[in-house]
Amino acid sequence: MTVQFIEDHTGDIIAQGLKYALASWSLREDRTVCMTTDSGANVVSALRINNWKRLPCFGYRLHIATERSMRDPRIDRAIGVCKKVVRAFYSSWKKKKALVDAQEELKLPMHKLITESPTRWGLRWHMIERFI
């Protein structure tokens, strides 16, 4: 279920929206064990307002830990170079064709380069792995 919040995304409004979502699915609050969330202050507040137990999302915490561990100028530079090369191939049909031709000539698997996305943390690893 998706609900659009036209108002500000405050803890109070999100708390009401979550109660509405449970009710619309005929789920009882008293049978809800917990909710898994990221660490957004407004979402944490909403669960506190509703007096619901929160289970922090492992994937989100792993993403944050990974991002913090990557804060190093040497890593930033290497990732920047990767992203620059990937962007060059994405923006040029000639370079894309040259990559396909080179893969065919060298009898390599036909792969495209992968670009990272800030909202999909695993893609950074895949981008680097494919680049190498």
Image (tube, grey):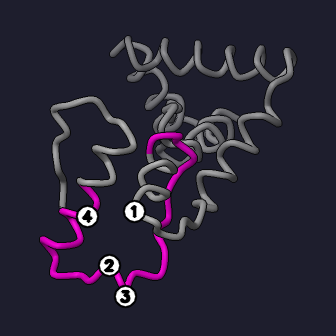
Whether residue 70 sits left or right of residue 48 in the image: it is: right
Report the Cα–Cα distance between label 2 and label 3: 5 Å
Report the Cα–Cα distance between label 3 and label 4: 13 Å
Three-letter amino acid code at the position of disc 4: Lys
Secondary element at image label 3? helix
- Circles 1 and 2, Cβ within 8 Å, touching? The answer is yes
Q: Which residue is mark 1?
A: 50
Q: Which residue is mark 3?
A: 31
Task: Give the quarter of the figure containing the N terminus.
Answer: bottom left
- Circles 1 and 4, Cβ within 8 Å, touching? The answer is yes
Q: Is residue 115 above or below residue 44?
A: above
Three-letter amino acid code at the position of disc 1: Asn
Whether residue 103 sits left or right of residue 79 in the image: it is: left
| Percent position of residue 125, x then y | 66, 42
- Circles 2 and 3, Cβ within 8 Å, touching? The answer is yes
- Circles 3 and 4, Cβ within 8 Å, touching? The answer is no
Q: Is residue 98 above or below residue 88?
A: below
Three-letter amino acid code at the position of disc 3: Arg
Three-letter amino acid code at the position of disc 2: Glu
Q: Quadrant of residue 73?
A: top right
Crowd class of label 3 (few under 14; some 14 to 19; many from 20; radius 10 Å): few
Crowd class of label 1 (few under 14; some 14 to 19; many from 20; radius 10 Å): some
**Upstream in sequence: badge 1 or badge 3:** 3
106 and 46: which is toward the camera: 46
Secondary element at image label 4? helix
